[in-house]
Amino acid sequence: MSDTGNRWFEQPPKPLRNRAPSRVADKDLWTRCPSCSEILYRPVLADRHQVCMHCAHHFKLGARERVLLLIDEGSWRRHDAHLAPGDPLGFVDSKPYTQRLVRSQQKVGEWDAFLAGSCSIDGIDVELGAFDFRFMGGSMGSVVGECITRLFERATERRVPAIVISSSGGARMQEGILSLMQMAKTCAALARLRDEAGQPYISLLTHPTTGGVAASFAMLGDVILAEPDALIGFAGPRVIEQTIGEALPEGFQTSEYLLEHGMIDRIVHRDQLRETLVALLLWMGARQVIKLEEAEE
Ligand SMILES: [Zn+2]
């Protein structure tokens, strides 16, 4: 072997430089709080259920994480996971609706923006559902509306309370009138839950709950809870300002503003959500089923 070859061989290996992946890793690991501007370490943020440890800002939470936060372990029975959206109008704006659907389906790993199931919360049987905002802004098309309708129908049939966690930009414009129809359909199913089964419905509003979702079942809870500082309203503040030609009051359409004006019942920190729901359900007459471990004793 030549001298040159030996020297080259004896040199310590240079560290591999590949800037692109390290940038991606940094982006994945750190984020800035939009409320207090602190830099947050994502794994810690995830441990705290996406609540800022400095200012308690509530970040958005996916539907699965929402469900896992509340239910008794092993009690979840998923429903309607097979319902997939069509494209009844052949809708195309800047891109075809079908393309938007496929992109969201790949991102979220679900056919549409709503997750529904039967489960128990501290031993109380309920029907629970949650929006996933990552899927086309949590918009309500035919599938989401059908899932919510079936949730209320199952609750009616099983005579158990219903809980829906909303996070939505409103009705899905790509399905036109079929989306708007879901507003009436879900509300009719909810009315039957009350009339036929006499069971309560708790609505939790999270950031943001707007449009056709806010204008239907989301604001019809027997008890309406909201997360702190969530945007809740029908039209967005910019649209209202442009329409009425006036500046809006500070904090307009936040959960705090709505609580002050009697539109919602309570603002609940994410950490206290489960115990608040349990207390409310018991207060409204729900019964805890005997837990397995107690039954075996
Ligand atoms: Zn913060």
Image (cartoon, grey):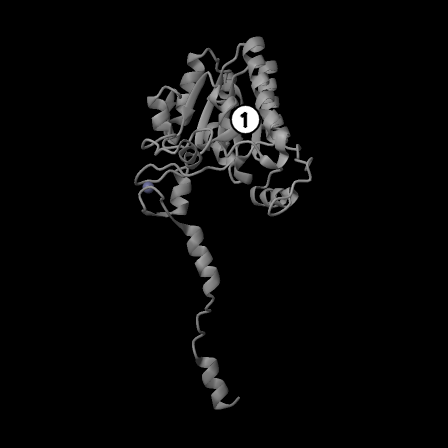
Point out residue 191 in the picture as x, y percentages from the top left corner: 56, 14
Ligand 1 occupies quarter: top left
Above or below for 254 versus 105:
above
Q: Nearer the viewer, residue 45 or 194?
A: 194
Tell me where residue 91 sits by quadrant. Answer: top right
Write the residue at 47% across / 83% down. Answer: 8
As drawn, is 98 to the left or to the right of 22? right
At a point 35% along the width and 37% down the height, the residue shown is: 57
Q: Residue furthest front?
A: 245
* In the displayed structure image, the side of residue 13 where residue 260 appears, left or right: left
Say if 3 sits above or below 229 in the image.
Answer: below
Query: How many labels, in total?
Result: 1
Q: In the image, is the residue at mark 1 within 8 Å of ligand 1 by its beta carbon? A: no
* Label 1 Cα crowd, 10 Å radius (few <14 / some 14-19 / many 20+): some
Viewer-closest of 120 and 191: 191
Amino acid on which the number 1 mark rests in the picture: Ser
- What residue lies at 68% left-to-right and 36% top-to-bottom? 89
The location of residue 19, given as percent across then percent down, is 45, 65
Q: Position of residue 35 (x, y in %)?
A: 33, 41
Q: Nearer the viewer, residue 73 or 185?
A: 185
Q: Is residue 84 above or below residue 187?
A: below
Q: Secondary structure at mark 1?
A: loop
According to the picture, the residue beneath numbered tag 1 turns out to be: 75
State whether residue 72 appears in this view. Answer: no
Residue at 42 percent across and 51 percent down: it is: 29
Q: Is residue 75 visible?
A: yes
Q: Residue 160, position in %: x, y?
A: 54, 15
